[in-house]
Image: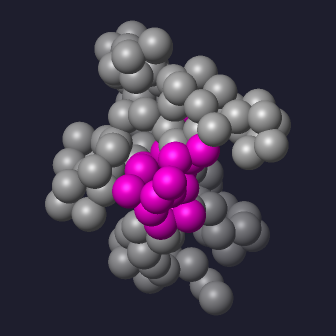
């Protein structure tokens, strides 16, 4: 992820994210082994994989636009720059994975949260 003007993936950023995620998972596993009775439960929740799947296979989830955000050009605007009073917003946000150039849409977040519930609830003491 981490796209430029054409919203393509940047291999170096993807590699860095995968490396960080792998090391974070290992650290959390080791911390849990050191003192499982006294250490709070730590759970690594991987959202990188599900977001990448939304980008790569958005049609499977019913999205027609997976690389450009709904706001403005969809490639560079983010957060406050996506104020509908000043910046055009697409007609059907639910067709897009991203609202702006960075943040998923509400519909994409639903897919992400469902993924978390399906894959991680067993590890959470709720």
Quadrant (top left/top right/bottom left/bottom right) for the C terminus: bottom right
Viewer-nearest residue: 121 or 39: 121
Is residue 64 located in the magenta-colored stretch of the structure? no
Task: Answer whether residue 74 is visible to the viewer in this image.
Answer: yes
Viewer-nearest residue: 71 or 15: 71
How far from the left and from the top, in percent, is residue 99? 56, 46
Quadrant (top left/top right/bottom left/bottom right) for the N terminus: top left
How far from the left and from the top, in percent, is residue 84? 74, 45
Residue at 56 percent of width and 64 percent of height: 106
Residue at 42 percent of width and 75 percent of height: 114
Question: Across the whole image, how many numbered discs are drawn on residues?
Answer: 0
Say whether residue 39 is left or right of residue 27.
right
Residue at 40 percent of width and 22 percent of height: 7
Is 10 placed above or below 112 here?
above
Looking at the magenta stretch, what is its main secondary structure?
loop
- Range drawn in magenta: 89-109
Is 22 placed above or below 84 here?
above
Say whether residue 6 is left or right of residue 41.
left
Task: Answer whether residue 46 is visible to the viewer in this image.
Answer: no
Say whether residue 27 is left or right of residue 13.
right
């Amino acid at each position: 992820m981490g796209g430029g003007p054409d919203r393509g993936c940047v291999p170096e950023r993807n590699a860095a994210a995968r490396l960080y995620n792998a090391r974070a998972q290992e650290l959390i596993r080791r911390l849990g082994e050191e003192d499982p009775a006294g250490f709070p439960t730590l759970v690594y929740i991987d959202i990188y994989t599900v977001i990448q799947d939304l980008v790569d296979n958005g049609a499977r989830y019913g999205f027609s636009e997976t690389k450009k955000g709904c706001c403005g050009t969809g490639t560079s605007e983010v957060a406050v720059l996506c104020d509908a009073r000043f910046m055009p917003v697409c007609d059907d946000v639910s067709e897009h994975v991203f609202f702006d150039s960075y943040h998923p849409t509400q519909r994409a977040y639903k897919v992400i949260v469902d993924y978390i519930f399906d894959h991680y609830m067993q590890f959470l003491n709720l």
